[in-house]
Image: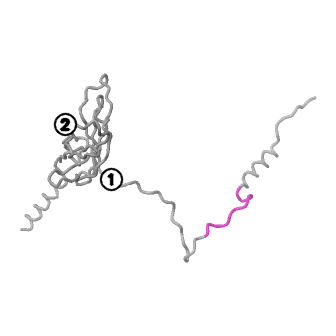
Amino acid sequence: MRASTFMSAFCAAALTVHAAPQSAEIFVQPVSSSSRAPLPLAEIAYDVAALASSSVLSYDAPEIPESSKLIRVGVYDRKTKSWVSGTTVASTENFAKGCSPTILVNVNSKGDVLSAAIKGVQIDAGQTRDFGPKVVVLTEGKGAQPVLNKPVVLTEGKKAEEGEEKSFLQKYWWMIGIAVFVALSGGGGGEQGK
């Protein structure tokens, strides 16, 4: 009985370590006085263990009214009619001619989408043939830790004294020795024999 319990726990742990690829649907919504429902933009696939293999499964260029200059980007739940992730605001110029959209998605260590953004990258038709949309998935990470100075040493509740400051002679006695040696060794041969 114990062996089967151990085996099932081991298999469950192995499955959580090797997570399956996940997908998310990204939506856009025009930001204007007349709010429209969010429109599907793209469906992406990603794997937290291998972020470089993230891809765009489907992409539909949104039909945004010309009066709107800004859009909201994020993950939207159609059933609850609410934004599931954090949203960002972007310009509609990211969808202009000559721009290839790059979708930026931030996920946590479990693979849940925290926020989404879009950036239009200008393309040069002479240098590349890959004009399609791209996705970049980033995971949250631990921030940089501060570098601290050495700790203050306390003795009997008071700061330990660093010692007495050395005098000029104690610091530079060796320089005086060099100067005396150079002076006594002579400066060189002057003119002899005149």
Quarter placement of the N terminus: bottom left
Residue 17 position by quadrant: bottom left
- Report x, y in % for residue 171: 70, 57
- Look at the picture and state if 40 lies above or below 192: below
Helix, strand or loop status at disc 2: loop
- Report x, y in % for residue 23: 18, 46
- Report x, y in % for residue 170: 72, 59
Amino acid type, callout 2: Asp
Quarter placement of the C terminus: top right
Residue 166: within the magenta?
yes
How many numbered marks, from 0 up?
A: 2
113 with respect to 145 (left or right): left
Helix, strand or loop status at disc 1: loop
- Look at the picture and state if 13 lies above or below 121: below
In the displayed image of the protein, which residue is found farthest to the left?
1
Residue 14: within the magenta?
no
Q: Main secondary structure of the magenta part?
A: loop
Q: Is disc 1 surrounded by few (<14), some (14 to 19) or many (20+) residues within 10 Å?
A: few
Residue closer to the observer: 48 or 118: 118
Q: Disc 1 to disc 2, how far (Cα)?
A: 31 Å
In the displayed image of the protein, which residue is found farthest to the bottom?
156
The magenta region covers 161-171
**The label number, if any, that marks residue 141 in the structure image:** 1
Residue 16 position by quadrant: bottom left
Q: Is disc 2 surrounded by few (<14), some (14 to 19) or many (20+) residues within 10 Å?
A: few
Amino acid type, callout 1: Gly
Instruction: Tell me which label, 1 or 2, sits earlier in the chain.
Output: 2
Q: For mark 2, what is the residue?
A: 60
Q: Which-is-in-front pick, marks 1 and 2? A: 2
